[in-house]
Amino acid sequence: MIILQPDIGNEFTESSCLAPGTALELLDLHLATHHTRVVQKAGEISFLGRRWKITPGETKQVTILQQPGSFRVIARQPTPLEPEWPDILAEYRL
């Protein structure tokens, strides 16, 4: 399966440009709903009305990737220039 995405490196032209998308193993990362949360002093975040423990890190803000039945907490939001999986600080099943 080949995934195509808009080529963001080119300026807008009359013709459309598509470039190969990210690897299939990153598809979960891109299809999840992203939420930003602030890490509390106790190494916890608030999400869905509860407090959840995460692996301590240097970041004050984390991104939650919510999928049906589960969510992951990652240290930083991926960017088109760095599309690889960031460090996963926690993973929970709902």
Image (cartoon, helix red, strand yellow):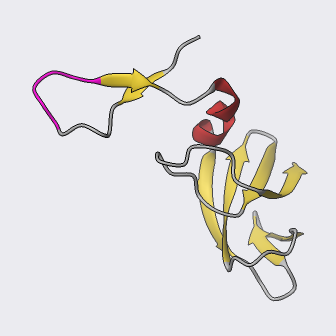
Q: Residue at x 88, y 52 (%)?
A: 92
> Between residues 55 and 44, which one lies in front from this camera angle?
55
> Between residues 66 and 85, which one lies in front from this camera angle?
85
Q: Residue at x 63, y 44 (%)?
A: 84
Q: Confirm whether the magenta stretch covers residue 77.
A: no
* Quadrant (top left/top right/bottom left/bottom right) for the N terminus: top right
Q: Indicate whether 79 appears above or below 5.
A: below
Q: Along the horizontal axis of the image, is 21 left or right of 36?
A: left
In magenta, the rendered stretch is: 12-17
In the image, residue 34 lies at what x, y percent? Answer: 60, 53
Q: Residue furthest bottom?
A: 41
In the image, residue 2 lies at what x, y percent? Answer: 53, 14
In the image, residue 86 lies at what x, y percent? Answer: 69, 53
Q: Residue at x 58, y 39 (%)?
A: 30
Q: Residue furthest top?
A: 1
Q: Residue at x 54, y 49 (%)?
A: 82
Q: Along the horizontal axis of the image, is 67 left or right of 23?
A: right
Q: Indicate whether 93 appears above or below 1.
A: below
Q: Indicate whether 84 appears above or below 62.
A: above
Q: Confirm whether the magenta stretch covers residue 16.
A: yes
> Between residues 56 and 52, which one lies in front from this camera angle?
56
Quadrant in the rendering for residue 23: top right
- Give the main secondary structure, helix, strand or loop, of the magenta stretch: loop
In the image, residue 17 lies at what x, y percent? Answer: 26, 24
> Between residues 54 and 21, which one lies in front from this camera angle?
21
Q: Residue furthest left?
A: 14
